[in-house]
Amino acid sequence: RRFAWAVGRRLVRLGFTMTPVGAATTLTESWEFLPDGVAMFEEKFGDGASDQIADRTQQALDGIPKTLAAIKRIAESIAANG
C-alpha cells in the first residue's frame, strides 16, 4: 500500500501511498527534504539555503500532478489492453 525511497542516499524522501476506494485505487505522492538534505543545502548555499529549499520543494510539488497523471494513463492503458 505504501512505498518510498530516499533520493541521494538521505537527502529527499519520495513516496507513494495507494488507498482502495471501492473498485478503484487512489494514488498519493509525497516528497520532502530530509534532515541530511537540509544540512547539505545549508552547507552549499549558506544564507540562501532556505530560498533554495523552498524553490526545490515547490518544483517537486508542482511536478506531482504531472507524475500522477502519467501513472494513471499508463495504468488505465494496461487495464484496457489486458
Image: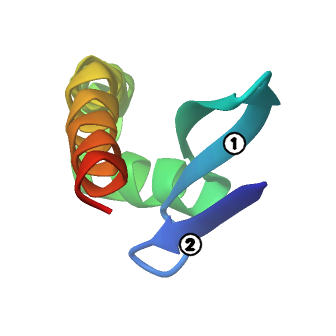
Q: Residue 26 at what x, y percent from top left?
A: 62, 27
SS of the residue under disc 2: loop
Q: Name the residue type under label 2.
A: Arg
Name the residue that disc number 2 marks.
10
Name the residue that disc number 1 marks.
18
SS of the residue under disc 1: strand
Q: Is residue 24 above or below residue 13?
A: above
Q: Residue at x 61, y 52 (%)?
A: 34
Q: Residue at x 33, y 36 (%)?
A: 72
Task: Give the mark nearest the N terminus, 1 or 2.
Answer: 2
Disc sitting over residue 43 in the figure: none
How crowded pointer 1 is (Cα within 10 Å; few <14, some 14-19, many 20+) is rated as some
Q: Name the residue type under label 1.
A: Met
Count of numbered tags: 2
Question: In the visual, does 38 lie left or right of 17?
Answer: left
Q: Is residue 2 above or below residue 48?
A: below
